[in-house]
Image (cartoon, rainbow, N blue to C red):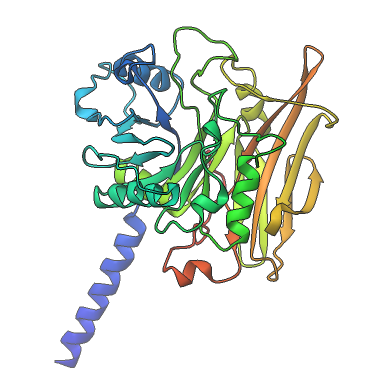
Amino acid sequence: MIRRFAILLTALAAAAAFAHEDKPAPKWYRGNTHTHTVLCGHADTTPEAVARWYLDRGYHFLCLSEHNRFIDPATVVLPEGRRKDFILIPGEEITGKHVHMTGLNVDGLIVPVDRPTRTATIQQFTDGTRAAGGAPIINHPNFNWALTAADIRPVKRCYLFELYNGHPSVNNEGDVLHDSTEVIWDRLLTDGMVIYGVSSDDAHTFQKMEPKLSNPGRGWVMVRAAELAPKAISDSIDRGEFYASAGVMLSEVRVTGGEYKVVADVRATEAEVEKPELLGKLVQGEREGWRVDFIGPFGKVVRSVAGHEAALKRDKSLAYLRAKITYTRRTDAALVQYAAWTQPAFNDGRLEKENLPDPFAHDHAHPHD
């Protein structure tokens, strides 16, 4: 009996080892969580042609997020003979009077209900998205100056918001009276919220490319997932296993218990910034070239490094640490800056308190291998 039990344990161990070896390693996928088609009434291109735009430019996934309309990916005909590493993720831009949110990978239409406060409305949209099996994303908080950090902070089970949105009218940078979206992010993080920054292009106009139009290809996410499937992608984004980009590509993101390290992919970034659709940020007083900023509570830059790669020893006294990587170049006598943002690594136990996974629990090196 003992011998048979030992044989059984050996067989189970061998099977577990085989399953572990057979499990495919996670890969990194490029995608957009927010775009529009003629079905919304104020965009200029069909769902099929919009999908084709992203397919032809090497994206791996796309969410057609119409205002209060659910698009079943099965109804969108993709080209025959296309590359197979491209999928559509079902979704909706749940749209109220002040609050717009993407319900990513939902299983059907979510009907918006405006509540007495903007916080309560965000919560209603969040709960509807969760009930429909999806991941909620707060869209463009500074569009019409709709949302502040105070509106967002009390919300439960919403871990994503648009840090960058490529639409020219959403006020990412704020103004003298309003915080930028990045300041909003640091306010939320400093106050103890678990929230990750998404980048999207919110495209409406595909037929004409101009800086003043809401064109595609301006913002995207690079997502680490076990497979290219709607649930796997959506779950990875919801867990913070991605970085956000508005032009800068990374070759390494590695966070351990002792160190936070990022390396930009110089060649890939140089190729991105040559694309006519990309919209950089006009800056003054900046140096040309690369910079890595490590940022902690209250948005304080803990360390700034000139160059395309940097590492910083993690200070456990800092509640969180994130990185922003910028590339600045001169074009037509103007300085234009492009950026990528990695997600915060937390040191204060907030993930454990909410029973949430650590997005850096796995090796994040070499996103584009």
Task: Name the residue rendered at 38%, 11% in the picture.
Answer: 44
Q: Which quadrant holds the N terminus?
A: bottom left
Compared with 112, 49 (above or below) is above
- Tell me: 175 left or right of 11: right
Q: Residue 226: in sight, yes or no?
A: no
Residue reaching furthest left?
1
Within the image, what quadrant is residue 34 found in?
Answer: top left
- Tell me: 175 left or right of 203: right
Q: Residue 78: in sight, yes or no?
A: yes
**Residue 258 at x, y percent in the picture:** 67, 66
Compared with 247, 313 (above or below) is below
- Tell me: 313 left or right of 142: right
**Residue 164 at x, y percent in the picture:** 56, 35
**Residue 297 at x, y percent in the picture:** 68, 59
Task: Name the residue rendered at 79%, 53% in the picture.
Answer: 303
Q: 145 and 352: which one is in front? A: 145
Task: Name the residue rendered at 34%, 24% in the picture.
Answer: 83
Task: Name the residue rendered at 32%, 31% in the picture.
Answer: 87
- Tell me: 201 left or right of 77: right
Within the image, what quadrant is residue 246 found in?
Answer: top right
